[in-house]
Image (cartoon, rainbow, N blue to C red):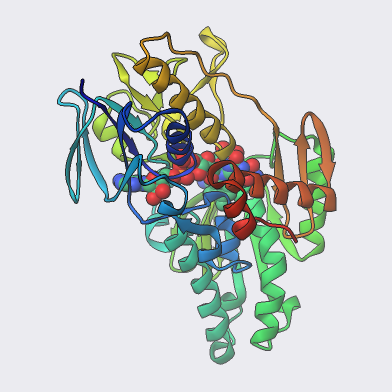
Amino acid sequence: FERKKILVLGAGYAGLSTVTRLQKILSFQDADITLINKNEYHYEATWLHQVAAGTIHWEEAAYPITSVINTQKVRFVPAEVTAIDRDAQRVETNQGEFEYDILVVALGFESETFGIEGMDEYAETITNPETSVAARQEIERNFAKYKTSNDPRDISILVGGAGFTGVEFLGELTESIPALASQYNINYEDVKITCVEAAPSMLPMFSDELTQYAVDFLESKGIEFKIGTPIVAANEKGFVVKVNDEETQLEASSVIWTAGVRGNSLMEESFEGAKRGRVITKPDLTIEGYDNIFVIGDVAAVMNGEGENARPWPTTAQIAMQMGDHAAKNIKEKLDGEKMHGFSFDDKGTVCSLGPDEGIGVVFGREVKGRRAAFLKRVVDTRAVFKIGGPFLAYSKGKFL
Ligand code: FAD
Ligand code: NAD
């Protein structure tokens, strides 16, 4: 009797949820489980807007992977995956090759710039701890420069996109930028923060009343919105926008692009049919033609509905964690020779924070705003840590204040 080799790629919300569930429901004899991740730590991607704004240090949003896995049952290998060979059942990494009987692909998201000229070169993004720290440092460097340059562009910040990431980042800036300004003896009134959004309205998943609440709050803190204003290029001066066929240069020294995500680009290289780094999964979370490969989290397109009306669910941490949990249960069923179950998303709602004390959201079908929403957001953030790492991790990493 040979123990089946289970290989999990990525220790984000999806991969860690899979492994922490597997280690509960499988015994050592059942399987040989290996987890591969680029870094030795897991980071809370959902807290990265705080890292980028400087309201938390990146290490507050990270913890060692070995602190949540049972190393008696799971082998953790810090390595970067470079290729997946489905037919040879082999994964290549910068630390060698790994074979598998069952593969779980949970390699997460990247920033999507839609090929916009200059964006990769001139804009910062909020994609992982490194890019988020770089965004924060860019803002700080430019504020410091202003002391000698007196150039208003050095205390101007452009944020591209008013999706969840953009709006949550703006919320954090309302907290961190007044403090940064006072540190450099700069009048906050002189700081210019502008958010540029292509669509005619923002956050369409919320009611007009909730969205207006968010806009009013952020505007009251001095943020300016340019809605219905697509960004068509980025350059050393800032963003170029195009409205009614007319191009305008918006100027700022700090430029942050938060206008889109895609799945890991490794997906296109290893899975035909992957679009924007996402592969359509079957209801049991395996993929067409390979019932031993599970694709979960932001690299998966999980359909909501059937036939022509089917649309993928938005890629979120909430769904990534539920998919990880479900994939683990299906793996156990597979090993036991039982029929695997279809995944269904239990949508508990969405909260969009606007800094530490404000927010908007819909939770269990009810609208919330203000301090209550901000409190619920901290509950959601703490719950995610608790679900993966249990009470001790929640105690050390949770947001209780
Ligand atoms: P990821 O979290 O991206 O994890 C992927 C893991 O794989 C990472 O550890 C990465 O280092 C590793 N990896 C990548 N490439 C390789 C490689 N080649 N080799 C080895 N390892 C690799 N969602 C919500 O539900 N609620 C929120 O409030 C929320 N807030 C957000 C705030 C921000 C600022 C952002 C950017 C996103 C937010 N999201 C939120 C979305 C959420 O973060 C993602 O949907 C979620 O992170 C997806 O989880 P994942 O496990 O699929 O991928
Ligand atoms: P998104 O794709 O949801 O939003 C991007 C925004 O940028 C959109 O409003 C889009 O119209 C705009 N945009 C795109 N191209 C543009 C252009 N050229 N010029 C100007 N604006 C442009 O991306 P996101 O906000 O990073 O969210 C990614 C995923 O993460 C989503 O599934 C989201 O639900 C999830 N998320 C959730 C939360 C939360 O629950 N609180 C927070 C952050 C992210």
The spot of residue 379 in percent (x, y) is 72, 47
Image quarter (top left, top right, bottom left or bottom right) of the C terminus? bottom right
Residue, x 35% and y 43% (percent of image)?
Answer: 72
- Residue found farthest to the bottom: 148
For the residue pair 310 and 367, the one nearer the viewer reads as 367
The foreground one among 397 and 94 is 397
Q: Position of residue 330 (x, y in %)?
A: 44, 20
Q: Place residue 171 in its image quadrant.
A: bottom right
Residue toward you, 99 or 30:
30
For image coordinates 27% across by 24% down, the residue present is 272
Tell me where residue 351 appears, x and y as whole percent.
71, 43
Which is nearer the eye, 313 or 206? 313
In the picture shown, does residue 56 fall above or below 207?
A: below
User: Can see residue 229?
Assistant: no
Residue located 41% across and 28% down the image:
26
Residue 311 seen in the figure? yes
